[in-house]
Image: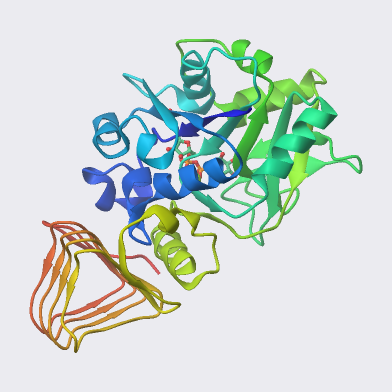
Amino acid sequence: MAVGILLVGGMGTRLMPLTKHTPKPMLTVAGLPVTEHQLAMARKAGITTVVLATSYLSELFTPYFGDGSKWGMKLLYAVEDSALGTAGAIANAAQLLGTDDSIVVLNGDVLSSHDLSEQIRQHESNRADVTIHVTSVEDARAYGCVSIDSLGQVIAFLEKMERPISNTINAGCYIFDPAIIKAIPGHRVVSVERETFPELIDSGRKIRAFLDDSYWLDIGTPKALLQGSRDLVTGIADASALKLADILRHDQHSLVMASASLDSSAIIDCGSCIGSGASIGAGAHVSASIIEAGAIIGRGATILDSYIASGARIDENAKISAQFVTDTEFLSIPT
Ligand code: GDD
Ligand code: MG
């Protein structure tokens, strides 16, 4: 059975100030950390052993996820004292696995409803060295551009081009033959996108594309983070992780986690979610937003297209639109 590595060590710079004290994968979308949604997706494909490859704010993962038994999984932690880059992180984490099974690597900031079981099946039946999930986007500039021949072989991998050569991109989910990972140089910074993949292609290795255009989103930008949460709440994205969560109520307009306190006159709509223990005052209106666990929204406040982090407190009758709010900062989300 395949095993997994989750790359969760990046700085999440584009999501400051939310990521000042919380690593990007621990930010909550639809009431749960991004990582929890990804673990549910991996579990669904039969993966039960996963290494979290951590670096930035690594100490914040273990108290929440522990040994993984709550999710019927075995979770291990690989900590990089300083970030090793994506391939360095994979090589470092794989040392904890010591296995001959296929290794599934996931970027830790992606929500994807693609068919991971089928990706693994095709990888193994093709006896590929690496099989990359490839999806299509309108503007490929922010991604790794992947060129594929008519037989599904990857013939070029070009990270973040000004003039993309295709609209097919790296969706950040790879199946590796473990021997390929063993050959990654250890203990130094290596990028899987800028070094490992181009080098493997140049040396004629079998790098296959798994094309699947199901729901897919990189939540690494402010707008995408809010979009991802709404898509999970409204059912556009696969929200299997919610099956194991403590929920007060959930319909296609809103999600309220257990122990949140909600005045009966408050309106929660447009895919908003209210985290556990949050408090929403009388007459407040929360629309298309994320209210994290424990945040307090005063009576009569209006919250639109915003992320209110744990510990934040919004005054009575305040009007908040397109903002990130933490316990100490307000930041407008760039349009
Ligand atoms: N452990 C560890 N160590 N994790 C890391 C490191 C590191 O040094 N550097 C990055 N990561 C993790 C991040 O936490 C994130 O989950 C993932 O690797 C990808 O990094 P991002 O910073 O989010 O990269 P990106 O979104 O600009 O581009 C990547 O994702 C795109 C798809 O969303 C690339 O893989 C692109 O090729 C791809 O198209
Ligand atoms: Mg990203």
Residue at the left extreme, as displayed: 316
Residue at the right extreme, as displayed: 150
- Residue 319, given in percent of the width and then of the height, sits at 19, 81
Q: Quadrant of residue 326?
A: bottom left
Residue 41 located left or right of residue 211: left
- Residue 133, given in percent of the width and then of the height, sits at 68, 43
Vertical arrangement, residue 260 with respect to residue 220, above or below: below
| Residue drawn at (12%, 80%) of the image | 281
Given residues 13 and 210, the one toward you in this image is 210
Residue 81 located left or right of residue 310: right
Residue 7 located left or right of residue 26: right
Q: Quadrant of residue 151?
A: top right
Which quadrant does the C terminus fall into? bottom left
- Residue 32, given in percent of the width and then of the height, sits at 35, 54
Vertical arrangement, residue 50 with respect to residue 249, above or below: above
Which quadrant does the N terminus fall into? top right
Given residues 116 and 190, the one toward you in this image is 116
Vertical arrangement, residue 115 with respect to residue 58, above or below: below
| Residue drawn at (18%, 84%) of the image | 284
